[in-house]
């Protein structure tokens, strides 16, 4: 069958066979994977929940992983990474995404405003090392903030579907109850599963907070969360006094990530903390790096080195390299550095080996650099 498809591909050159099939039906493909949006909900302000029906190539995801979707906006294909919120063994093979419309998020704002049933998007296989281990640990602590709720919610739903017999606590930080997606379901999970605890903490809406009642469980849900506060050791002890014996999964804004890591490092528990970032935490830049020129040899364009990432400099020079997450996760923007040195903005590490693949979104040129794009 594969050989026959290759022959047909040759006969339909210069376009791949899927380009012709999509004229009949966008989801009728042989090699490309796509998904049709079958349901759209906007349950909380600023977020949209999409249910997608993928084509036959979809093989599922592990709870916590992400998928990359491609959306056509004004004739230009844009790709972004989102973590499914559904359990990993959903029987109907559907994918559920909850997307927060970020102020500067082109794709997220487009989906929030314009997504409708019947819309077809490109889809890439699930990826990422942030997922539940197998076998499951006896104790699991899930910590998230803001839109970081999506991968850990998939974990919680998966554990619920599996009738997980261990102990799990989910600690989530949000501005207010109104912006927490799937809040009602979180409440229901704690009622159905004796070993599940959900603690929602609101950082701005003090009117929704109530002190914890004497003798109450060390977690609460919805409007019964304790007083407004930030993450700290006392909070960790309150919701999960056994955290040192658990495996912890963390996803959220940089301030929350840093606070959790500080405690786990101090307690020598780094090996029990697993994290996924949805923003780039940059190492301090050296102004001396912004010198020389950047040559994009694949297009014959040369630009003065501004010190920004190679992806940003390529875009400023009028180029349109492929990218997805813009934070070093999805590998969509990988290109070959022919010569020169680059600094990884996440780690601060310097690398100058020639003819090496690098990620444009998290590498900045140091002096003269040539990249094959």
Image (cartoon, rainbow, N blue to C red):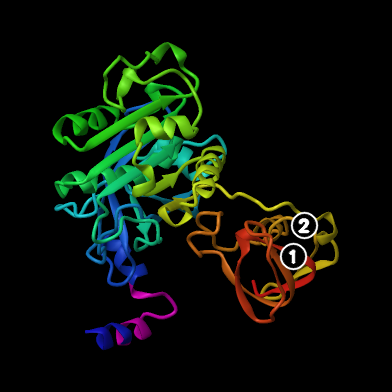
Q: Was residue 340 drawn as part of the magenta stretch in this picture?
A: no
Look at the image and tell me whether residue 252 can be seen: yes
Q: Are marks 1 and 2 in contact (CB under 8 Å)?
A: yes
Q: Residue at x 53, y 49 (%)?
A: 265
Crowd band around label 1 with a 10 angstrom C-alpha radius: few (<14), some (14–19), many (20+): many
Task: Please count the marks in the image.
Answer: 2
Residues 168 and 71: in front is: 168
Quadrant for residue 54, please give it: bottom left
Q: Which quarter of the image is occupied by the N terminus?
A: bottom left
Q: Residue at x 67, y 55 (%)?
A: 312
The span picked out in magenta is 7-17
Give residue 269's position: percent from left, percent from top: 46, 52
Give residue 257's position: percent from left, percent from top: 52, 43
Q: Secondary structure at mark 2?
A: loop
User: Which residue is disc 2 drawn over?
Assistant: 307
**Upstream in the sequence, badge 1 or badge 2?**
2
Q: Was residue 9 drawn as part of the magenta stretch in this picture?
A: yes
Q: Secondary structure at mark 1?
A: strand
Give residue 357's position: percent from left, percent from top: 59, 75
Q: Is residue 260 above or below residue 16?
A: above
User: Which residue is disc 1 drawn over?
Assistant: 365
Q: Residue at x 58, y 50 (%)?
A: 280
Q: Is residue 306 above or below residue 112?
A: below
Quadrant for residue 202, please give it: top left
């Amino acid at each position: 069958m594969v050989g026959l498809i290759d022959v047909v591909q040759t006969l339909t050159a210069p376009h791949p066979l899927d380009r012709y099939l999509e004229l009949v039906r966008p989801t009728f493909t042989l090699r490309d994977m796509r998904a049709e949006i079958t349901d759209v909900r906007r349950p909380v302000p600023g977020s949209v929940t999409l249910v997608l029906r993928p084509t036959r190539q979809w093989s599922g995801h592990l709870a916590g992983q992400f998928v990359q979707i491609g959306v056509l906006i004004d004739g230009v294909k844009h790709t972004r990474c989102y973590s499914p919120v559904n359990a990993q063994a959903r029987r109907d093979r559907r994918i559920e995404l909850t997307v927060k419309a970020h102020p500067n998020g082109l794709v997220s704002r487009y989906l929030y405003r314009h997504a409708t049933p019947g819309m077809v998007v490109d889809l890439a296989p699930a990826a990422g090392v942030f997922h539940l281990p197998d076998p499951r640990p006896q104790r699991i602590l899930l910590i998230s903030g803001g839109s970081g709720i999506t991968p850990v919610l998939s974990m919680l739903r998966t554990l619920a579907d599996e009738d997980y017999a261990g102990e799990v606590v989910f600690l989530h930080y949000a501005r207010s109850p109104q912006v927490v997606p799937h809040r009602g379901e979180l409440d229901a999970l704690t009622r159905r599963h004796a070993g599940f605890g959900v603690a929602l903490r609101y950082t701005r809406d003090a009117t929704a907070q109530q002190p914890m009642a004497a003798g109450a469980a060390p977690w609460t849900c919805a409007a019964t969360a304790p007083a407004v506060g930030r993450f700290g050791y006392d909070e960790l002890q309150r919701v999960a006094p056994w955290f040192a014996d658990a495996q912890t999964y963390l996803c959220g804004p940089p301030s929350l990530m840093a606070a959790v890591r500080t405690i786990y490092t101090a307690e020598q528990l780094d090996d029990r903390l697993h994290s996924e970032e949805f923003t780039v935490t940059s190492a301090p830049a050296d102004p001396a790096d912004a010198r020389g020129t950047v040559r994009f040899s694949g297009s014959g364009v040369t630009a003065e080195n501004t010190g920004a990432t190679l992806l940003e400099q390529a875009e400023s020079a009028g180029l349109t390299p492929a990218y997805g997450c813009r934070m070093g996760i999805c590998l969509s923007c990988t290109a070959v550095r022919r010569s020169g040195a680059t600094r990884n903005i996440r780690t601060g590490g310097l690398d100058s080996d020639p003819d090496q693949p690098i990620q444009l979104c998290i590498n900045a040129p140091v002096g003269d650099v040539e990249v094959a794009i």
